[in-house]
């Protein structure tokens, strides 16, 4: 009788676990300065339906200046950020504003540094994902650039050197 009750309890627990909603996929990137720079930060990515909620905090920027922010193809920063390769562009689109339909998947909003050299981006994006598929950003790099993104120059936005880099890792 004890065995039957124990088996029934285990069966109920297993059924309850299967019906519990699972946590949405999440990822993070720890931004480290590239050689000769002092910019640091962190980014979180959380799948929210068919979009990814992206929050990026950065410090050590030039006060009042705007900086390009992009997801890059490679998952290795190297000392200067160049191992991260070019912008993440699995759909073969031109470089553009993050809110445009025609853009790289890696095109993000610019960072606008406050008087203390800190900046935050908080946005939901629709052509990247933390799930499997061509838009998956896990294992890619997040780059902070020295200059503003003009959203026009191909393929980089003329955003300048790479001043911080972090690899996007699944939680």
Image (cartoon, rainbow, N blue to C red):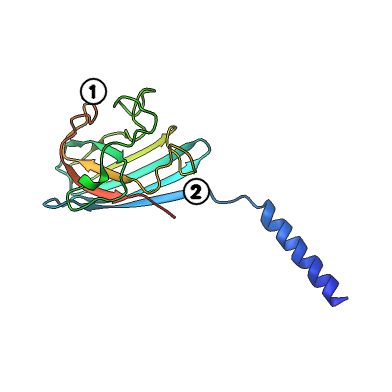
**Residue at point 39% right, 29% down?**
91
Residue 102 drawn at (x, y percent): 36, 22
Residue 124 drawn at (x, y percent): 42, 36
Q: Is residue 124 left or right of residue 96?
A: right
Q: Is residue 134 left or right of residue 145?
A: right
Question: Which residue occupies the foreground of this view, 46 or 84?
Answer: 84
Q: In this view, does 62 lie to the left or right of 101?
A: left
In the rendered image, the residue lying farthest to the bottom is 2
Residue 108 drawn at (x, y percent): 32, 35
Q: In which quarter of the image is the C terminus?
A: bottom left
- Dot 2 corresponds to which residue? 25
In the rendered image, the residue lying farthest to the right is 1
Q: How far apart are marks 1 and 2 (CA)?
A: 32 Å
**Vertical side of 40 occupied by 159: above or below:** above
**Residue at point 23% right, 23% down?**
152
Q: Quadrant of the N terminus?
A: bottom right
Q: What element carries label 1?
A: loop
Residue 133 drawn at (x, y percent): 48, 39
Mark closer to the chain start, 1 or 2: 2
The crowding category of the residue bearing disc 1, from other C-alpha atoms within 10 Å (few below 14, some 14 to 19, many at least 20), is few
The crowding category of the residue bearing disc 2, from other C-alpha atoms within 10 Å (few below 14, some 14 to 19, many at least 20), is some
Are the residues tagged 1 and 2 within 8 Å (C-beta)?
Answer: no
Q: Looking at the rendering, which quadrant does residue 94 occupy?
A: top left
- Dot 1 corresponds to which residue? 152
Q: Is mark 2 on a helix, strand or loop?
A: loop
**Residue at point 72% right, 62% down?**
13
**Residue at point 38% right, 36% down?**
123
């Amino acid at each position: 009788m004890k065995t039957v009750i124990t088996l029934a309890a285990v069966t109920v627990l297993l059924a309850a676990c299967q019906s519990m909603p699972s946590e949405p996929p999440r990822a993070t990137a720890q931004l480290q300065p590239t050689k000769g720079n002092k910019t640091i930060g962190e980014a979180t990515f959380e799948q929210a339906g068919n979009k990814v909620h992206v929050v990026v905090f950065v410090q050590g920027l030039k006060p009042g200046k705007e900086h390009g922010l992009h997801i890059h193809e490679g998952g290795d920063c190297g000392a200067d950020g160049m191992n991260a390769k070019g912008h993440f562009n699995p759909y073969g689109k031109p470089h553009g504003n993050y809110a445009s339909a025609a853009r790289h998947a890696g095109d993000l909003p610019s960072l606008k540094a406050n008087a203390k050299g800190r900046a935050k981006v908080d946005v939901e994006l629709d052509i990247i994902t933390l799930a499997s598929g061509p838009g998956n950003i896990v294992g890619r790099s997040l780059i902070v650039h020295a200059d503003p993104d003009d959203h026009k120059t191909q393929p980089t936005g003329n955003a300048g050197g790479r001043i911080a880099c972090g690899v996007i890792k699944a939680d």
